[in-house]
Image (spheres, rainbow, N blue to C red):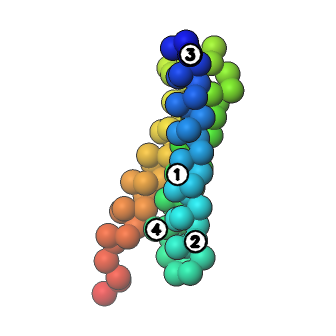
Amino acid sequence: MSSEELIVFAEGALTALSLVAALFFLRDWRSTRDRFFGFFTLSFVLFAASWAALAFRPSVGEHNEYVYMLRLAAFAAIAIAIVDKNRGAPR
C-alpha cells in the first residue's frame, strides 16, 4: 500500500468517524433538545465534509481555502456552543 493510498484511507476513516460522532450528538439532541448538542452535531458534520473533500479529491490538499473554511466553521460552532452553554440565565 502506497503512502498516498494510506492517507486517503485515513481520511475516509476520519470522515466515517466524524459522522458517527455527529450521530451520537444528534441522538442526544433529539432526546434533550439542548442546543449544545445541536451545535456539536453541526460541527462534526462539517468536519466530516472537510475530511471527505480531502479523501475524494486528494489533489485539493490540506491547505485549500474551502477545506479551511469548513474547519473554521466547525470550530466556530463548537465555540458558540460553549459560550451559549455557559451563558447564565438572565436575572
Contact? badges 1 and 3 (CB < 8 Å): no
The kind of residue tagged 1 is Ser
Tell me the SS state at disc 4. Answer: helix
Which mark is nearer the camera, 1 or 2? 2
Taking the spot 53% from the left edge, 22% from the top edge, the residue there is 6
Label 3 secondary element: loop
Q: Quadrant of residue 86?
A: bottom left
Image height of 10 relative to 59, above or below: below
- Gap in angstroms between the C-alphas marked 4 and 3: 41 Å
Mark 2 neighbour class, 10 Å CA radius: few under 14, some 14 to 19, many 20 or more = some
User: What's the distance in space between the residues labelled 1 and 3, CA to CA?
Assistant: 32 Å
Which mark is first along the chain, 2 or 3? 3
Mark toward the start of the polypeptide (4 vs 2):
2
Q: Quadrant of the C terminus?
A: bottom left
Point out residue 22 in the picture as x, y percentages from the top left corner: 56, 57
Q: Which residue is mark 1?
A: 43
Mark identifier at residue 27: 2
The Cα–Cα distance between marks 1 and 2, rounded to whole angstroms, is 15 Å
**Crowding at label 1, few (<14), some or many (≥20) Cα neighbours within 10 Å?**
many
Indicate the position of residue 78 as horizontal and vertical percent values: 43, 54
According to the picture, the residue beneath numbered tag 3 turns out to be 1
Pick whichever of labels 1 and 2 is earlier in the sequence: 2
Give whichever of 21, 46 is nearer the camera. 21
Residue 26 makes an appearance in the image: yes
| Identity, as a three-letter code, of the amino acid under mark 2 | Arg
In the rendered image, the quadrant that contains the N terminus is: top right
Q: Residue at x 52, y 73 (%)?
A: 28
Mark 1 vs 3, N-terminal side: 3
Circle 4 is placed at which residue position? 36
Q: Looking at the image, which residue is at 63% across and 14% down?
A: 59
Q: Earlier in the sequence, mark 1 or mark 4?
A: 4
Report the Cα–Cα distance between label 4 and label 2.
12 Å
